[in-house]
Amino acid sequence: MPWVYVALIGSQLLFSVSDLMGRNYMKLYGFSTAAFASVWFVVYFSIRIVATIGQLYVFASIDLGKTMALFSVASLVIANVLGLLVLKEVLSPTVYVGISLAVVTFCLLAFSR
C-alpha cells in the first residue's frame, strides 16, 4: 500500500510541475498554434501522460472518496510549496491558516473509517 501513496504524491507533483511549465511557456509564446507545435508542449504533454497513469493506479487502489481527499491534500501542499519556492509568492498568514485547516480537514476525510 505505501507505493500507492508514492504514486499519489508523484503524480500530483508531475501535474503541478507541468502546470508551472504550461503557465510559463503560454505566457512566453501566447495561446497560438505554434505554441502547441513546439518541443516544450511535447514534454509538457508527456509529463501529464505519466501523471495520468499514476493517477489511474491510485484510483484503482484506493476508494474514490479517500483518493479525492488525498489528491486534494497533495494538490494544496504542492501548489503552495511550489508557489513559494519557484514563483516567490508569499500569501498572508490568514491564507496559510486556511490552507492548513483545509489540509487537516481533507486528511480527516481520507483517514477516517
Image (spheres, grey):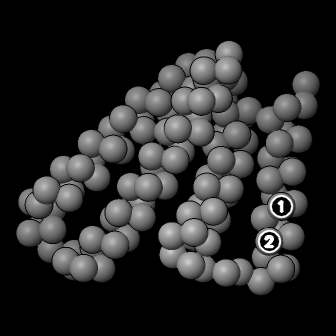
Could you say where residue 78 lies in the image, as x and y percent from the top left?
Answer: 61, 55
Looking at the rendered structure, the kind of residue marked 2 is Tyr
Q: Is residue 1 left or right of residue 19?
A: right
Kindly state the secondary structure of the residue where label 1 is placed: helix
> Picture coordinates of residue 96 (x, y %)?
80, 71
Residue that badge 2 annotates: 96
Marks 2 and 1 in Cβ contact (< 8 Å): yes
Does residue 58 appear in the picture of this structure?
yes
Give the residue displayed 80% in from the left and 47% down from the top. 106
**Rendered location of residue 76, percent (x, y):** 67, 57
Q: In this rendering, is residue 62 above or below 18? A: above
The type of residue carrying mark 1 is Ser
Q: What is the quadrant of the N terminus in the image?
A: top right
Instruction: Mark yes or no: residue 59 visible.
Output: no
Residue 61: quarter of image: top right
Which of the 4 quarters of the picture holds residue 49? top left
Q: Is residue 73 left or right of residue 27?
A: right
Q: Residue 100: which disc?
A: 1
Looking at the rendered image, the quarter that the C terminus falls into is top right
Task: Please report the residue visible at 9 percent of the width from the left and 60 percent of the height from the top.
Answer: 37
Local SS, label 2: helix
Where 92 falls versus 48 (above or below)? Answer: below
